[in-house]
Image (spheres, coloured by chain):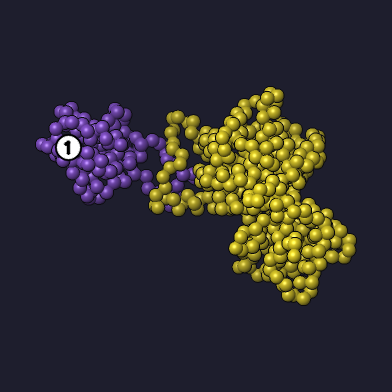
Amino acid sequence: MDYKPIKKVISGNYAAAYAAKHARVEVVAAYPITPQTSIIEKISEFIANGEVENLQYVPVESEHSAMAACIGASATGARAFTATSAQGLALMHEMLHWASGARLPIVMVDVNRAMAPPWSVWDDQTDSLAQRDTGWMQFYAENNQEVYDGVLMAFKVAETVNLPAMIVESAFILSHTYDVVEMIPQELVDEFLPPRKPLYTLTDFDNPIAVGALGTPADYYEFRYKIEKAMEEAREVIHKVGREFGEKFGRDYSQMIELYRTEDAEFVFMGLGSLMGTVKQAVDVLRSEGYKVGAAKVRWFRPFPKEELYELAKHVEGIAVLDRNFSFGQEGILFNEAKGALYNTDAKPIMKNYIVGLGGRDFTVSDVRKIAENMKKIIESRKLDREIEWYHLKR
Amino acid sequence: MDTPFGERKSDAQRIAFKSVDEYPEAPISLGTTLINFTGDWRTFIPVVDDEKCVKCYICWKFCPEPAIFIREDGYIGIDYDYCKGCGICANECPTKAITMVKEEK
């Protein structure tokens, strides 16, 4: 941990761009979309200023093509990066399956933005969570520092298990808000993240291969199993890489769920991304008022940290799951996952789903207090008033 | 036998994986079709009757693989390592010299 970080006051998007630069990405193919655009603008600027060597920027006509170009680049063995948001991510959907199916460790930053209609550019997690089943790993950043750290770790994890990874940050709350980010000197990043060793490469002409092979019913099944094995392995790799990051740079990411003041907590708030920053602040306030509460920030949504969730769930009476997203016809997506992960265990905390902040609706410390009051009542009476609460709804 | 283009075919064997551990980690085809023959996909197999063949080579032009070649004696031959049994040759043949028969495997 003996190093001098480079401190800069930058936006979440610039943190992503600097991380891509420090990761020495070789190919960036991207298409502009608010609120992601300033990531790729910054990367273009690095190239225009001659600040990066050996980086090809591929301007494309759509996000679908952006991901397709990254897939091609990654299949040659290059380190590929892109960024997008909302409708752009949805347009990429087909290609996301191709990236994971072909086992290519592409890293993408998705700036969470609400899906239209109605048109919105504000924060909402449904865009990324709707890509849950594509075989991409997903890391949710709480702040700009985690965007920077997340991109660097994502490359290392992705290239170890040969699966793509998505680093998710919030529209405007992180993407365009300036904050201090401690960046790591290039030589130390190089030490942490050595050049990629690809599983295969299209440019080995003595040993030709074809990518995108046909898998008949006799073979397809086994390749799907291998993706799941890689996801399982990723859990171990995430712990290891997160610990190494902490030892080297002072910020530990060994836990897939970050626990904040959960020891002796009666109930905890659980959620993803930037809203958990607000929740942590609220936990401090609530603790000072005598509430025994904590926060559980789910850093990695895929692979899902079910063992860590179980360990937490065993020791609390209730979990308030805060979802800035919704799966229509069911419930909040994190709530659905968490409830499901605990079903076959002996941990049975009371769980309630609060739908908050959709489309950038402000979610503040006083909102967390109101939810705490509601949860306290539920736990004291052992009676769930309702399972899903549309918290902000104007009634 | 070499391919109609003169490339040397390897002594190919159908790759069949017995356990999940034998599979490559990613779904890639190892080697080219000089190793991986595609002929075993077919159900029906074209059979040529040289007596009816008038050497028009329409089948040779239409074969999408291309798995039909012209023999030294001017008649046509079929490379069964690559023929997928689509039947286009039999359909196009003006003298009905090619018939599709169910292949015994």
Label 1: which secondary element? loop
Query: x, y percentage for residue A346?
Result: 65, 70
In the image, farthest residue toward the left:
B51
Q: Is residue A210 left or right of residue A79?
A: left
In the image, farthest residue toward the top:
A50
Number of numbered markers: 1
Give the residue at x 55% y 46%. A93
Residue where numbered disc 1 is placed = B94
In the image, farthest residue toward the right:
A288
Please name whichever residue, A239 or A86, is drawn nearer the observer in this view of the structure: A86
**Display colour for chain B:** purple
Query: x, y percentage for residue A125?
Result: 67, 52
Task: Give neighbour class at mark 1: few <14, some 14-19, many 20+ (Cα, 10 Å).
Answer: some
Q: Is residue A108 left or right of residue A279?
A: left
Give the residue at x 45% y 47%. B23
Residue A336, image quadrant: bottom right
Can residue A162 be seen? Answer: no
Give the residue at x 86% y 61%. A287
**Display colour for chain A:** yellow
Can residue A177 be seen? Answer: yes
* Quadrant containing the N terminus of chain B in the rendered view: top left
B7 lies above or below B98: above
Q: Is residue A263 left or right of residue A115?
A: right
Please name whichever residue, A245 or A352, is drawn nearer the observer in this view of the structure: A352
Q: Is residue A205 left or right of residue A264?
A: left
Query: x, y percentage for residue A266?
Result: 79, 67
**What amino acid does circle 1 point to?**
Pro
Give the residue at x 80% y 59%. A367
Query: x, y percentage for residue A90?
Result: 58, 47
Chain letter of the residue carrying label 1: B
